[in-house]
Every structure is written in C-alpha cells, then in structure tokens.
Amino acid sequence: MPISAIEEADLFARLVELEDTDRVAVLAEFDLDEESRARLLALLGFENGAEDELGLSVSGAMREWSLAGVLEAGMRVGRFEVVRELGRGGMGEVWMVEFEEQGVRRRGALKVLRRHLMEPDQAALWDRERRLVARLSHPYIAGMIESGTLEGGMPFLLMEYVEGRRLDDAVEGMPIAGRVEVMRKVCDAVAAAHRQMVVHRDLKPGNVLITSDGLPKLVDFGIGQALDLGQSYLGAGTRAYSSPEQLAGEEPTMAMDVFSLGRMLERVAGEGGEELGSIARKATASAVGERYETVGELEADLGRWLEKKPVRAFGDGVGYRLRCLVRRQPWVTVGGAVAVGLTFVALVVAWKQYEQAQKRAADLQALAGVAIFDLDEEVRKLQGSLKARQMLLETATKYLANLEVAAKGNAVLRAELADAYLKTSALMSASSAQSLEREDDSFDLAEKGYRLREELGQFDAKDPKIRKGYADSARDYAQKLRLKRRIAESDKIAERAQQHIELWVMEEPKSWQALDHFLFLENNKTRRLRLKGIDLAKENQQKVVARLPELKQLGAPERSYWRQMVIQNSLMAGVMGGVHKLAPEILDSMTKAVQAAEQLYRIEQSVLTTRLLLTTYLEYVEYTVDVDMVIFGENERLIRRSEEILRSPELPDKDAAFWEQHRLEFLIMRGWAAYGRKDDAEMGRWFAECRAGLDRVEPKPFWVHMRRGQIGNIEKQAKERK
Amino acid sequence: MTHIIRLSNYNKEILTELTTLIAKARDGEPGAEPLLFERIYPELHAIARQRMAGEMYAAESTESLVHECYLRLKKGGLPEVADRGHFFAVVSRIMRQILVDFARMRMAQRRDKRLESPIDAADELRDGQAEKLPELLAIDQQLNLLEQVAPEAAQMVELRFFGGLTAEEIAEHLKLDVGHVRRRLRYGQGWLRRAIAQK
C-alpha cells in the first residue's frame, strides 16, 4: 500500500538531514513497499537544489512581469493593431498602431498606462493629462487624435504618429542657419504649449522629429508628466538635457524647458559662433533668474540672430518689462519666480489691486471687521470665476514662497508674511478644493501664520488691525487643530488668544470687533466646560448670549450680529443636547437659531450664509425628530426651503463640491422626517438614495463615514422600535 | 544565490496594528476601512520592495506589484484575518495569483502570436527568460495539488516563494518549531520538483 503524503512527509523529515549512508540505514527500519520507497528516494534526490531552481522560476516570472508592458507587438486591441513600441516612460508606454478610418489605413501613436492602475487619484491624473494634451494644437506638436477607453477598461490616448528623423540626426549636413531656424520653430511650439500652461519637461533631440518636409514635430508631451507618482518616477528628464533644479527634483516649471532648449541648441548648433554660444549660455544658466524668462524670449533672440540683428543680452519687450515690474516690488525676488509671461503679470497686478482695494476701502471699519472666515467671501466677490481664483491661489502660493525667502531677518516683511499666510489660507477656502492635500496645506499655513505672529508679539500690538489679525490667526489655527483631533493643543491656543482678546476688550470697550472676537473665543470655553458638565457650560453660554445685544449697540453691522446669533444659539442648544427634560429650552434656542439664520440669509445670500442656513435647518430637523417632537408643519417647511435653495439657479458657486454634501444631508433630513412619521418604507428610499450619493464621493472625507454611520444607526433604531 | 529576500525589518507592532484594523473594518466600524487601506499600502510596498531589492528591478515595478496587490485586496473585499500569520498568507496568495494571471495571459498572447511569426518565437527562446512563465504555471498547478495532500507544506512553500518569508519568519508566524518548518519546506520543494519533472 503506497503511503500517504503526510506519512511520506514525516519519513522525509527524519531522513533529509542525515548523511546518505545514515539514510539507507534508517530507511531500512521502515517497512515500505517498493513504490513508496522508490518515490521517497526520488523525492530526496529532487529536493537537492529544489529551492534554488524553484526560486529561479518564480523570480524569473516576477522579472518578466515587472518588465512586461500592457501591449505586445502583433496584438489586436479594439480597432488598433499594435505594430511596434515607440517608447516607455514613467508608467506609460507608447506603441505605433495601425487602424482603419473611413476605409483608409492610418497610423497612430497609442499611449496606455503600463498597468491598469486606475485608483481615483490616478484616474484624475490621467484625465488631467488627456485634457492638457487635447489643448495643444500647433503645427509643430504631434497632436491628439482621440482619447478614450479600450476593452477591459484600459484608458488610452491616440496621438498623431510622426515619421521622421531625430533632430540631431536630421541636422547633419544642414547649414547652421537652417539648424537655428529649426530650433526657432521648436521654441515656437514650446512657447505655445507654455501658453496653455503645459510644460514638456523632457525636451531632448529624441523628442523632436524632423519630417520629410524639414519641419519639426514635438512628440512625447507629458509622457511622464501627468503620470508620475512621486518617488516611484525615475529619471524625470534625461540627464544631459535637464536643468539642475529638475534633477534636484523640483516641480516642473517653464524655466526647465528653457534650459533644455538651450542644451539642445548647443547640441545642434554648437559651432555656430560666439553669438549663438551666448544665447545658449543664457538659456542654460544654472540660476533660473539668469536665464531667458520665457521661451518666447529665447525664440526672439534666435530670430534676431537669423536676421543678423544684434542679439540682446537681456532680452526686451514683455520679459524686460516683467522683470522691471517684479524688481520694483520689494516682496518678490526674481530667483525662483515662475514667469508665465503676460498671465503672471496680470495676476500680480490683480493681486496688488485687491490689496489696494482693501486699504482704500471707504468703510475702513467694515473691512477691518472682516474676519478671516469672511475674507474668502470678499475674494469670491472680487474674482468671479473659480478658475481665476485657483490661478490666483497658485500665484499667491508662489508669492508666499518668495516672501518667505525675502523676509528672513526683515521685521517689516515678516509682518507682511504673517498677513500673506492668512490671505492665502482664505484663498484656499475660496478655491473650494475639498482635497485632503489642501487641508494639509491649509493647516501648514495656519500654523506658520500663528507661530509667526506669536514671535512678532502681535497679540500685544497697539494697532487694532494687527491685534485683529492675531485673533483671526489664532481662531483659524485652533479650528484646524480641532479638525486634526489635536484638541488639547487647540484649547491651549484658544485660551491664550482669549486672554489677549479679553485684554483687548477691556482696553477698547467701544470696539465691536473686539467683542465679536471675544464671544467667538468664548465658544471654546463653553465646549471645554461642557466636558465637565452641562450646568457650567450653560451658564457660560448664557453669559455670551446675554452680551449679543451689546454687539448691536456698539455698532456692529447686521451681518456680524445675526451671524453671532445663529452660532451662539446653536451652541446653546448643543450644550443642552441630549437632556430630555431640557427639551423645551433646547427647542427654543434652536428656533432662535433658525430665525437668525433666516435673517442673515435675507441680508446676504453668499456661500457662507447659505451654508449656515442649511446647516441650521438640518440641526433643527435632526433634533426634533430625535426627541420625537416632530413639529410637522415646521419640518416640512424647512425641508422644502432647503430643496428650493439647493436647486435655485442663483446658488452661489454652484459647482462647488460642498453643495453635494448639503444635498446628501438634505436627503438624510428627508429620511429623518420619514422616520419621524414612522414611515419606514419612505425612510428606506431616502436613505438608499443618500447612500448611493455618499458612495460616489471621492476621496472620502470624514463626514462621509460619519453620515454613513448615522444612517446605519437610524435604520437600526427603526428596526428596534418595530 | 538567494532569490528570496527576507522581511527582516518587519515590525511586530505594525503587524499587530494591521490585524486589529482588519478586524475593525470587517466589523463595519466607520473609518476603519479607509484607514486600513491607507495603512496596508505602505506595508505591501515594503514587502514588495524587499522582494525586488536583490533583483535590480526599477522602483516603478515595485510600485506596480504593490499597487496591484492593493487593488485586488480592495476589489476582493477584506479577507478574514485572524492574526499576523494569516495576513501574510493572504498577501502571499495574492502575489501568487498576480503572477499566475499574468503568466496565463502572456502565454495565451504568445500562442496566438506564434502562429503568425516564427521569427519572434526564435527570439524568445534565445532570451532564456522565455520559459519562466510556463515554469511558474507548472509550479502553481502542482502547488494546488500539494495543497490537497499536504496542506501545511504547501502553505509554507507559498509563504516562502511568493511572500518572501524566511523559515524563521514562517516559524514565528505559524507558531511552529523552526526545524519542523525547514523540513516541511524542503519536503514541499522536493515534492514540487518531483511532480513537475514527472509530468
């Protein structure tokens, strides 16, 4: 009877570590049939060297896997026939394909991701690349024919297939003027791309093909650009043609392309004489500030060389004017500045105008009273389109970086820097980005701003505006710490700020701004007291609410007053929340909050006031249903109002992502209300719709998980009460 | 020449944390799942990087392997993981599956291609690497059989070759004596080789 594998394994275990001779001896002790004996001996034989051999096979397969691309020559994918590989980079590969279009056989360059790695953030990068490439339309740039998805979900870009010789090969035997003319055309193409805010980043002779009619075609725009994943992307740019800052891993800039073009010029027209040499040197200066500011300038100088006009050492026209403009402002250093030609100038000017507008404001008080949380509203009114605001944010961020450098050791600039942190943070909210990175950036700014102000001793300043700036900064930072769940630190900051504000209030009893800030900061105190018990918190909050009329008396604008009313009454309700016997009082506070929110909305229909209104409505509905105090008429009214508002064409900033959050919360409201009416079927429908919406939110911020949990809880409760 | 790289830097605390997170996520605790995937990702990355370290692969292929592993975990939902050993078993299984799927796909493509182009076939054989994929499939096939008759040995082999664990690490995670592990491993390896040779 042949032995089982387990028995064989045990026998094997006894034999394997013995010497050959001993094995024979031990084996003889066991009564084995011939077959089993033979198999066991064979096994022992095969075991020798098995580890290495098996290891080789597996790692060999692994190597193949890692080197394999998505496509292979000869494959047929969709309507494309894959012919040969043109290149590989980052996480994408490009193949030459053939396909039929209207009966004609055409060729194209098909670009795919090396792996089907379509995580949400990657999908976004891919989309971005598609859009970037689609924008590029220039006779000297290989254009995009089509983009889409192949079977199996593989996204692709189909680009114009260019047949031609590499630049450095093609210029052999060409007279120098011809070479320079080709380079000038290449510059023209790159400049066009820059105007579309696209940086090539891998300019080199291999990426410029010269077609049979002697014209250049730039290929490979962004082959790695949109797809790089940070540390996994190796070799951004080819060493010989990459600028020092690019090799150091800095973010792509147009100055990098200028450098690469300079190197290419050297390669292609190196022995063209002193003037060409000086052009090339200027383009390839190590310091960004010493290069041509734009590709356009480089092109212009090449043009001048061709026309035998004197080559200007420092360029002229826009570049020169820009540099002069930039030099006049003490807060921008040229080195490191990202010049985007006219666009940059326009943004800089707009930014300065905004600042001037602030200073020149007729009602100084009104502007001075604008807390940081309202600054973003001001910006919204000023700029209009979301895209413009985002561009402004980008400029602001770069300006900030420059200012950080310039401000070292300069007290005046450091104060300016503190303001810059605050404003940039406000701009971030104004750009409505809901990404986690933005949150981190925003937090960094808040932290830096606050620390700087502490260092500068701004809490003690004589100038009320500076004090206000300090208060804003402290509030902002404390709030962001809360969001990061660093509660202890948040409370410390808030307390410290509070002490200063109290001082401020005492020193300036007539200042409504001081009181405004003071009351907001008292909220933190209320929250902390709540941890100890309701009574203390309630007492504190009552004190706050009692001082609200004072705000009005001191001349606070309606807006600030009503805003305080909403927030303080909400908090009052929140403090007492959960205690059943206080229900009438809670309801009273909530009703006041709702009324105040509606008042505020009547005065102003901005994003802030709208969101505040919707949130207050939600809280009201949630509470009343929770305590079974369903006030039918009222709930229905609030829900209908919310619906109207969210559907209104007048909704400010309609495309912002947070409205989706409100819509989903409104669906929860509907579900809640149905639960309150004991209509479980309807409740189920609303919650299902809400869940579907929550699933669609990507990436998932904290509130999504919270709401999911909330829905789950309510459904559980509904089941239990049956 | 070692083809299998150790996970010598593996941190016990990390493993415990991961196991707890998996349990929480399975229970539907809100926030646990995204946190888990965030945490798993770098760990898989570390595994894959070590796995590839001696083989001179480009960093991006490590990224790919990890990413693919992560995608499958995500797509397939969370595995039932009782403890660290189990976690490793799951990861090894996934890595094995990735390779097997790839090998099958490639072989199928090549079969189709071979009919059209004898020249390419010759190129392949010259490569030397060409035969690794069929070998892998053979290993996978025989490993499936070994799982039927000697599951313990099969699991150890999988952990060793696809998860990259050493005998000591396997012993620790499966809570067995290291000598026993070594012997079982050798058995499994020998068995596979014998089975493949005799096919």
Image (cartoon, helix red, strand yellow):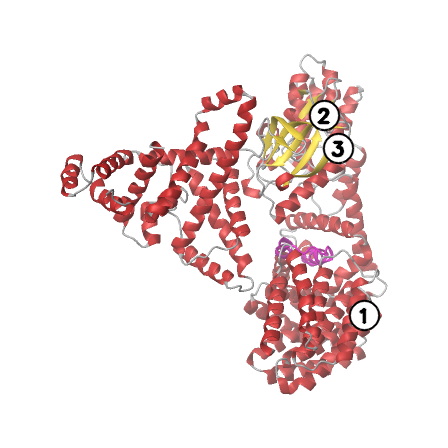
Crowd tier of the residue under label 3, counting other residues whose Cα lies within 10 Å: few below 14, some 14–19, many 20 or above: many
Task: Where is residue B181? Give x, y as percent.
Answer: 29, 47
Q: Name which residue lies at 63% across and 70% down.
A: A497
Counting from the top left corner in percent of width and height, residue B162 is at 41, 42
Q: Is residue A423 magenta?
A: yes
Residue holding disc 2: A106
Residue appearing at x 67%, y 58% in the figure: A418
Q: Which residue is mark 1?
A: A601
Cα gap from disc 2 to disc 1, whole angstroms: 60 Å
Mark 3–mark 2 distance (CA, rounded to whole Å): 29 Å
Magenta highlight range: A418-442
Whether residue A577 can be seen here: yes
Image location (x, y in percent) of residue A515 = 72, 75
Q: Earlier in the sequence, mark 3 or mark 1?
A: 3
What amino acid type should be assigned to the residue bearing mark 1? Tyr
Q: Main secondary structure of the magenta part?
A: helix
Question: Do the residues at pointers 2 and 1 share their chain?
Answer: yes
* Residue B52 belongs to magenta span: no
Chain to which mark 3 belongs: A
Q: Which chain does the residue under circle 2 lie in?
A: A
Asked if residue A244 lies left or right of residue B8, the reply is: right
